[in-house]
Amino acid sequence: NNYISIALENDFTYWRKGIFSIYGTLGVGFYHSSITDTDNAGEDAVRNNNTVTYQISPLCVSLGGRLGGYVELGVPWIGYKGMISGGVYLNF
């Protein structure tokens, strides 16, 4: 199975104070999947799927400067990041 996704995102800052930021994110992109099934006779059946994908995260929080973390809350059942996404970052 092969899965490929590429997207463009833009953040909209609602409020920023020092190293604390509240923002929203909108993203749109392209998703491709290629799934190969093999039956008992050894024959391959390939299923391809291409679709537009998107992300709507109206409430996101970031804390940090050069090193920090973030949490993004997406609209339920919508988007390629899911309902809750988070992580840490290090800016070089």
Image (cartoon, rainbow, N blue to C red):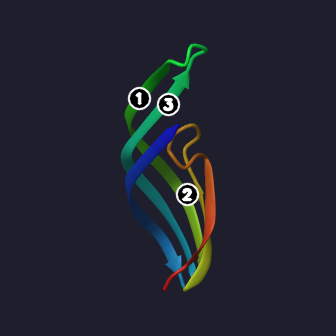
Towards the viewer: 14 or 77: 77
Q: Name the residue beneath numbered marker 3.
A: 35
Image quarter of residue 8: bottom left
Q: Is residue 67 above or below residue 72?
A: below
Q: Position of residue 89 (x, y in %)?
A: 57, 75
Image quarter of residue 22: bottom right
* Distance between the alpha carbons at the discs numbered 2 and 1: 34 Å
Residue under the image location 41 percent in, 53 percent down: 26
Q: Earlier in the sequence, mark 1 or mark 3?
A: 3
Give the amino acid at mark 1.
Answer: Asn
Examine the rendering and report whether any part of residue 64 can be seen: no
Q: Earlier in the sequence, mark 2 or mark 1?
A: 1
Discs 1, 3 touching: Cβ within 8 Å:
yes
Examine the rendering and report whether any part of residue 56 can be seen: yes
Q: Name the residue beneath numbered marker 1.
A: 48
Q: Of the numbered discs in the image, which one, if any, rests on residue 59?
A: 2
Per the image, label 3 sits on a secondary structure element best described as: strand
Towards the viewer: 22 or 49: 49
Towards the viewer: 19 or 14: 19
Discs 2, 3 touching: Cβ within 8 Å:
no
Judge the density around disc 2: few (<14), some (14-19), many (≥20) Cα neighbours within 10 Å. some
